[in-house]
Image (cartoon, rainbow, N blue to C red):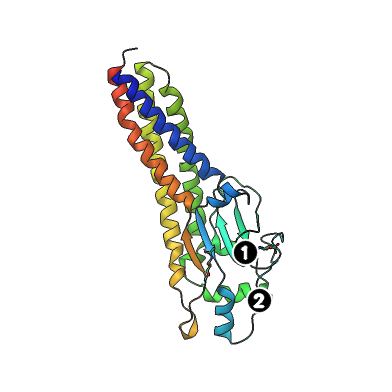
Amino acid sequence: MRGEFCVGSASFLSFTAMLLLIFVHVGSINTSTVPRGITMAKVNTSAYGQALGQSFIVPIQGLYTNDSTAPLGERAGLRQLYEFGLYSHCAYVNTTSGICTNHTVATKYEPYVAITSDMFLNYSQYSDAIFADTSFMDSSYLGSNSKAAYYFLLLGTIFAALALFTGVVKHTLAFFASTGLSIVSALFILIGAAIWTSIVKKSEGINSLVLAQGIPAGVTVSVGTGLYLSWAAFACLAVSVIPYMISCCTFRG
Ligand SMILES: *[C@@H]1O[C@H](CO)[C@@H](O)[C@H](O)[C@H]1NC(C)=O
Ligand SMILES: *[C@@H]1O[C@H](CO)[C@@H](O)[C@H](O)[C@H]1NC(C)=O
C-alpha cells in the first residue's frame, strides 16, 4: 500500500511538472488568452516616447503605432508592451490588441532588437545612443544565453515526460529509471530557469536608466509568469525524486 501511495504521488508530481512545462512552451506563441498570460519576460515601453520628448525638448511623433496588426520588425512603429516566450515574441498596442512573430525553435531573447526594429530609423539611432553599454542592449549575450536555456528547458520537459511514463510501469527497474530521469529533468529545468532568471534580471537593469535631466528612460523589463512556472516545475520534479526512490525499494517486480 505504501508503494502504491509513493508511485501515485511521484506520478502526480511528474504530471504536474510536465503540464507546467507545456504551459511554459506555449507562452507567447499567439495572442489568445492562455499563451498571452504566460511569458518569460515583459518589456513596457509606454513611457519611452515621453522621455524622449522631454530630453530632446522636441515633440516625438510617429514613434508608436496604434495599428495592432502592423508587422513586427519592419519599422512599422513601436508598441506599448512586448512579451517574450520560448518560440516567439508578441507586441501589444494596448492591453488587449497585438500581434506575434513567427515561431522559431530556440528563439533568442533580444528585447533591444525587438523594440528598435519596430522604430523608424531616426528613433532607433537615438536609442542606440541612449542604451549604449547596457545589458539590455547586449543582444548577443542575452540571445545566446536564452538559446542555451531553451534547450535545457526542452530536454528537461522530455525527461519529465519519460519519468512519468516509466513511473507507471510497476517494476523495480522502471522506478530506478524514473528516479534517474526525474533527477536529470529537475537538473535541466533548474539550469534553464536559472539562466532565464539571470538574463531577465540583467536586462531589468534598464529600469533604473535615466536620461539627461534625470528623466527615467521609460523602458521597463519585468519577469513573466512563464519563468515562475518553470521554477514551480523544477520544485515538483525535485520533490518527485523522493517517492520514486522509495518506490524503487518498496516494490518488488
Ligand atoms: C506600462 O508602464 C506604464 C507607466 O510607465 C504603466 O502606466 C502601465 O500600466 C504599464 N503597463 C503594463 C501592462 O504593465
Ligand atoms: C486596442 O487597440 C485596438 C486596435 O487599435 C482597438 O480596436 C481596441 O479598441 C483597443 N482596446 C482598448 C481597450 O483600448
Residue at 51%, 49% in the rendered image: 147
220 relative to 185, above or below: below
Three-letter residue code for mark 2: Asn
Q: Quadrant of the N terminus?
A: top left
Disc number at residue 94?
A: 1
- Residue 194 is left or right of residue 55, and the answer is left
Q: Position of residue 118 (x, y in %)?
A: 65, 65
Residue at 46%, 78% in the rendered image: 210
99 relative to 46, above or below: above
Residue at 65%, 69% in the rendered image: 119
Residue at 41%, 30% in the rendered image: 12
Camera-nearest residue between 215 and 192: 215
Sequence-earlier tag: 2 or 1:
1
Q: Position of residue 188 (x, y in %)?
A: 41, 40
Q: Position of residue 84 (x, y in %)?
A: 55, 55
Please identify the quarter of the rendering in which residue 241 is found: top left
Residue highlighted by disc 2: 122
Q: Is mark 2 within 8 Å of ligand 1?
A: no
Q: Is mark 1 within 8 Å of ligand 2?
A: yes
- Residue 60 is left or right of residue 11, and the answer is right
15 relative to 50, above or below: above
